[in-house]
Amino acid sequence: MSGRARLTLCSVAATLMAASALLPLVQQTSWILVAAFLLAVQSAVGAVTRRVPLARPLTVLAQTLVTLALLTLVFAREQALAGLIPGPQALQHFADLLQSGTDDVGRYAIPAPLSDGIRLMMIGGVLVIGLAVDTLAVTYRNAAPAGLPLLALYSVAAGLSDGGTDWLWFLVAGGGYLMLLLAEGRERLSQWGRVFGGAPRDAGRQPGPVAPVRTGRRIGAAALGVALAVPLLPLPAIDGGLLGGTGTGVGSGTGGGGTISAVNPLVSLRDSLNVDEDRTVLTLRTNTGDLSDLYLRIVSLDDFDGTTWKPSQRDVVAVPDDLPTPPGLGADVRRAEITTRVAAADWYAQDWLPMPYPPSGVQVSGRWRYEPVGMTVVGDHRQTTRGKTYEVKSLQVQPTAKQLASAPAARGSLRGEYTEVPDTLPAVVSQRAREITKGSSNDYERAVKLQEWFAVTGGFEYDTEVKVGTGRDAIARFLRDKQGFCVHFSFAMAAMARTLGIPARVAVGFAPGSQQSDGSVAVSLKDAHAWPELYFEGVGWTRFEPTPTRGSTPPYTLPDTPGSTVPDLPQASRSADAAASAEPSASTSCTSDDKRLQGCTDALPLDEVDRSGGGPPWYKIAGWTVLGLASLVVLLLPMLWRLRRRSVRLASAQHTASAAVVGAGPGTRGEVGQPTVDGGPAVLLDVPSEEVAEAAVAHVLAVWRELTDTAWDYGIPPDDALTPRRAAARIVRLGELDEAVAGAVHRVAGAVEQVLFAPQPRAGAGLPEEVRRVRVALRARVGRRARLRAVVAPRSAIRAVWDLNDRWTAVKATWSARLATVARRVRPGRRAADAGAGS
């Protein structure tokens, strides 16, 4: 195996070894097999183009184009021309996938499901890094800087992982990089000759590693050991990962005001509350008159690790026509079914469908899936709420305080899952929860006391610009500083409820919006909200509102006895009658005249078709794609024609020369004569070998034309008025060629004179090699720009136009001759016919 081939294999292996650090980030690992195959194809293209050889930039360009085609074949073949050539639609599909992958990275916890977007980001990232490594280490023969892209690949994985096995993946990635350096060093040493080698120590034994190689291995092992040992030392550390939040927003960043960590959609909740200009997100029309309980729930966060609340990874199914009864809801709890029609703004692209909880049915166009445990609807294959209008039927569950107080303990599996708290949770959280709820006789009383403490009696202030820090002590700091917004209140109350044995989770969505003059309800960015949900057997998941000045106090948390210490909180909208009824009240969003004229339905019509397939017609996309490809081919035609012409000239010349030396074949007579101009043997071509002589003449002239065209490409235009000998001297003078290369030019010119003027033409071998030697020398004397032009836009490519003109002239002459012949044949027949008619 050659040194460059070994270096190519090592670059592939080093990239895959660094990419293995990404394996713990997702649930499935099959993506790395696809990445390995595509990476092998990419590297094979580089190996082939380097053997042609192409210029280094063209090698990188060829690999880039092949990589784009491979990614198109895997991810966007339905949107591409012939399943392989990317067009505008395929590029838009890539953009959608990358946006979806970015959203999924923020939404899911590690290990995340292998969505199409995340899969594209991982495979595409590995191919980009692989191309960079191959370019640096193999194409440009400098393996040391190739460690930078490998380090970038490992750093992304280390920044996203939990840090438990970072040392192992660093060991693997570092081993790949050292292997790449050793392969390059071995290739360089092999080019220096045997001065670094020695005789085998034992007879019959292959020589071992030379001294520099052994030294390099020792240095590499020592450096790797230091790199592994340093992270174990008690050095100052910086909190926060690669995707940590900044400033004072929600996230795990190190900003001075970072708060309790969260995942999407919480990462933008605080920013939504602090926007300078409020914007309408959703517009609702509903048939309920009690808007105070019309919370729109997006998703529930039920996985708590002491630092972060996030959604659990659960299976999704097709959206059923009728959604099942929510878990835990008994038949004796009063409820009323309401209908809400929701229109999302064109700019609001949310993966989850905002709906009142609990939903009993949903009508929405597009690709959506249903998660049964959380009763949420999530978009599939990059489906979002952007511009969607949909209808949701939901239940207004109206339990009484007595029903909640008498609720039995939750069943074992649910209670165990939703009361779990990590050991790292500060003890002050559970201690304060017990102090607040001291004297309570059931979970309902404990939940009400927690809500009252946060909302009224605890002295908390609502502030969206607090600075409470991050990490496992975030809740404890919030309880100490008593400043925060809905995320803090909901997270803290849910965590404290769990320490008391009450199943709890956090819901994220929108608080009730504002009623408009036309009867609709506008939900804006500043209505973004988070609230805790506590589970009571026989009632199900029940909303509580601990955030002061936000949302509305649930009526079932108000005691029936007078003199309650729990005052009513400011509400976005209040019902005229707080008492629950078995039927929905008269609509305040749709008047009787509207109902009679069906104005409620027409105001927000449901989507009839899926808008996700919009865009220009396929034939326009195909036309523009074909036009773009045709333009690209036209631009590359000079280069392709020149490469093809060079290959044909030199290959055919070499073949003809070999045939002439060996013999012209049966029936010909060859006699060994004087040496040729390059010192090789020759065959005298006498009369019986006319065909071989003609071929030899033609191909020697083709080699000469290739030599003059090569000089033309590098800035020395031909002069057909000169003899071969004087033309060769001109090329040597203008090209400033040294003596060895000048000899090659003159040998080719001498061969031309032999086949043109000698009584007995002699074809010599080795002329193509002489031309290649001259080409290398001419290429070395010019700058990078001239080299690129000589390949991409060679001057001699104008001969293609001249050839076409000559062929067109020949075709016209041929057809003119044929027409003249036909005319001569027809004219005598016509004369004979005329003569017969006259007689």
Image: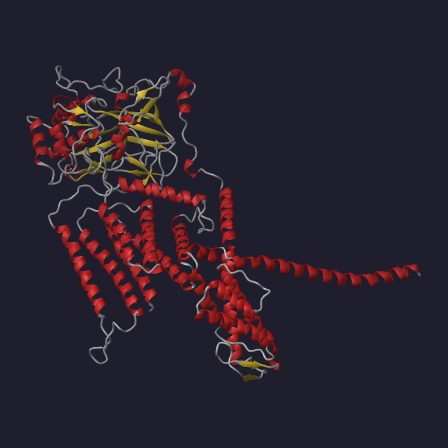
Left or right of residue 555: residue 343: right
Relative image position of residue 333 (x, y in whole percent): 22, 26
Q: How many marks?
A: 0
Q: Could you tell me if residue 301 is visible in this image?
A: yes
Quarter where residue 372 is shown = top left
Colour option used: secondary structure
Which quarter of the rendered picture does the N terminus lie within?
bottom left
Relative image position of residue 331 (x, y in whole percent): 23, 28
Left or right of residue 696: residue 572: left
When the figure is inspected, residue 85 is found, relative to residue 776, above or below; the finding is above
Relative image position of residue 425 (x, y in whole percent): 11, 38
Residue at far right of view: 839
Left or right of residue 670: residue 280: left
Quarter where residue 530 is shown = top left
Quarter where residue 36 is shown = bottom left
When the figure is inspected, residue 318 is found, relative to residue 14, above or below; the finding is above
Residue appearing at x 36%, y 56% in the figure: 38
Observer-nearest of 36 and 441: 36
Observer-nearest of 308 and 507: 308
